């Protein structure tokens, strides 16, 4: 009976199509054509009901899995006869598939694809495939539809979700492999961006690259072997980009530009992991890592000419050079109570970063000149000397208490005297203010802080040494100044 009903509905549709014809040869009056369209809309509903009943009689559990075929039939009818309701009904017909997926989740008590019933698994695949393929069908058979843009947006959302489909399962059951899974998602996203050629997919690939690198760094920080594999995979990708990027076609270059520009910074992460692994054989020490990274980025920005891969991120590399140069000092302050070996490594790291910054400032390279409006050379000189002062103050207080205070005061005075001679250079006249600041700081420290804790011998030695230094420097400074005039 249902087959006969469906056949009857089909016959009605064919008769309506025959008598309607086109506008020039139509046998129907205008109002009859409107009635004809309404009847065709009802015929589409009749098709749907009959086919659903037939599929339910064949297999009740899998009856809803026939919906994509019915929906395709409705889209065909809508495209042939310009039926708006039938087209919308074809999309609404996918809602029962969502309900079937939800029922499968409730029945199995799990979101995992593997644990759900077969009908729910098929419904997932059908729904996802239908949403992706609908736009292609529209472009070929129904390009004048108002829903073609909606189909395109739905397809794009599906393509964006495609690289992420397996991530929840990895997080749930294999959390330690998340960094590897994220790199796989990144590669899938790059392939889709190359095939589909949409900005949203390119942007997604950028985001996934950053997340994959962050996850890799976190895994390496936890000393997980999966993190080292992910680090190696990323290093291979970045190496290939550095070597082959210029030979790629324009579209591939556009898609991979961000990853290519990120490659010098990624190798900074590789360097940090290698240094931390080598130093970690004896003890975990981030001061050495920061010093090495400061040297790495200082070397990058000092290259002549600056490589094309680094030009967009040269400001970031310059900032990271300064940040990592200050980092050992900050870490040392936080771990002030440390073993002798750790303190020695901190002091060596701080001395190394001071040397790196001094070399960078004295060279006055193109990057420093390009950023002189944001960070003038005078401020760099002041900053370096202040950093030096803080460092040797910390170093001196690693000594026994009876030596720490006098030596720190003497070092402040020596530093101020050195700055006086530096200020004789016409380009460094402003540094005399910093020398005066150091002398004032040394006087304040000696008189108001150190004197209360000094022994008689310490007081005599400190004043004699400081006085001798000041007298000698004042003589030679005045002599050099007279010769200069």
Image (tube, rainbow, N blue to C red):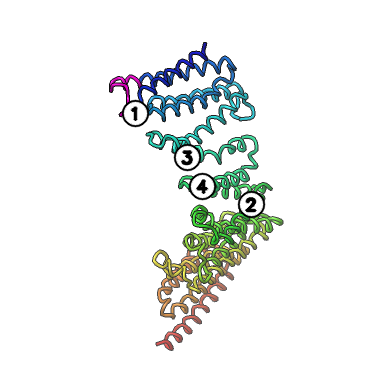
Compared across the picture, whether 92 is left or right of 294 comes to left
What's the distance in space between the residues labelled 1 and 2, CA to CA? 62 Å
Choose top left, top right, bottom left or bottom right for residue 109. Answer: top right
Kindly identify the residue that appears in the image at 51 percent across and 60 percent down: 320
What's the distance in space between the residues labelled 3 and 4, CA to CA? 11 Å
Q: Residues within 10 Å of mark 2 (few under 14, many from 20)?
A: some
Mark 1 or 3, nearer chain start: 1
> Would you place residue 25 above or below residue 185 in this image?
above
Mark 3 or 4, nearer chain start: 3
| Contact (Cβ within 8 Å) of mark 3 with mark 4 | no
Q: Which residue is mark 1?
A: 22
Answer yes or no: is residue 396 visible. no
Kindly identify the residue that appears in the image at 48 percent across and 26 percent down: 73
| Contact (Cβ within 8 Å) of mark 1 with mark 4 | no
Choose top left, top right, bottom left or bottom right for residue 459. Answer: bottom right
Q: Which residue is mark 3?
A: 156
Q: Residues within 10 Å of mark 1 (few under 14, many from 20)?
A: few
Determine whether the residue tagged by mark 2 lies in a helix, strand or loop: helix
- The numbered disc on residue 193 is 4
Answer yes or no: is residue 311 visible. yes
- x, y percent for residue 130: 51, 32
Of residues 418 and 464, the one nearer the viewer is 418
Q: Nearer the viewer, mark 2 or mark 4?
A: 4
- x, y percent for residue 263: 56, 57
């Amino acid at each position: 009976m249902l087959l006969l009903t469906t056949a009857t509905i089909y016959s009605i549709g064919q008769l309506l199509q025959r008598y309607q014809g086109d506008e020039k040869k139509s046998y129907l009056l205008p109002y009859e054509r409107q009635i004809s369209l309404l009847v065709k809309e009802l015929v589409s509903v009749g098709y749907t009901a009959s086919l659903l009943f037939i599929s339910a009689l064949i297999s009740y559990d899998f009856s809803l899995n026939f919906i994509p075929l019915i929906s395709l039939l409705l889209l065909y009818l809508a495209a042939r006869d310009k039926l708006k309701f039938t087209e919308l009904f074809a999309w609404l017909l996918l809602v029962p598939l969502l309900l079937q997926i939800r029922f499968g989740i409730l029945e199995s008590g799990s979101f995992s694809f593997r644990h759900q019933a077969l009908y729910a698994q098929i419904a997932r695949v059908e729904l996802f495939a239908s949403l992706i393929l609908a736009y292609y069908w529209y472009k070929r058979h129904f390009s004048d539809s108002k829903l073609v843009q909606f189909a395109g947006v739905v397809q794009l959302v599906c393509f964006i979700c495609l690289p992420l489909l397996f991530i929840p399962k990895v997080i749930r059951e294999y959390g330690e492999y998340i960094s590897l899974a994220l790199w796989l998602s990144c590669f899938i996203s790059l392939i889709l961006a190359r095939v589909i050629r949409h900005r949203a997919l390119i942007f997604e690939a950028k985001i996934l690259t950053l997340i994959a690198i962050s996850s890799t760094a976190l895994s390496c920080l936890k000393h997980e072997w999966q993190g080292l594999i992910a680090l190696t995979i990323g290093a291979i990708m970045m190496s290939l980009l550095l070597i082959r990027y210029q030979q790629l076609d324009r579209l591939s270059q556009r898609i991979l530009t961000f990853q290519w520009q990120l490659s010098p910074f990624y190798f900074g992460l590789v360097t940090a992991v290698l240094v931390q692994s080598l130093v970690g054989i004896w003890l975990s020490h981030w001061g050495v890592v920061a010093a090495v990274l400061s040297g790495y980025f200082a070397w990058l920005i000092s290259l002549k000419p600056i490589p094309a891969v680094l030009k967009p991120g040269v400001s970031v590399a310059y900032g990271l050079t300064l940040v990592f140069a200050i980092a050992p000092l900050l870490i040392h302050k936080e771990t002030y109570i440390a073993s002798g070996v750790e303190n020695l490594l901190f002091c060596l790291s701080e001395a190394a970063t001071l040397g790196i910054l001094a070399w960078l400032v004295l060279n006055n390279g193109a990057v420093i000149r390009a950023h002189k409006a944001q960070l003038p050379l005078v401020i760099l000189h002041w900053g370096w000397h202040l950093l030096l002062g803080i460092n040797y103050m910390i170093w001196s207080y690693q000594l026994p208490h009876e030596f720490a205070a006098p030596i720190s005061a003497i070092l402040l005075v020596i530093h101020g005297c050195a700055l006086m001679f530096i200020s004789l250079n016409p380009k460094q006249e402003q540094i005399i203010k910093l020398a005066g600041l150091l002398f004032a700081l040394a006087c304040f420290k000696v008189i108001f802080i150190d004197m209360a804790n000094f022994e008689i011998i310490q007081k005599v030695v400190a004043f004699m040494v400081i006085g001798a230094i000041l007298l000698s420097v004042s003589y030679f400074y005045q002599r050099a100044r007279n010769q200069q005039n």
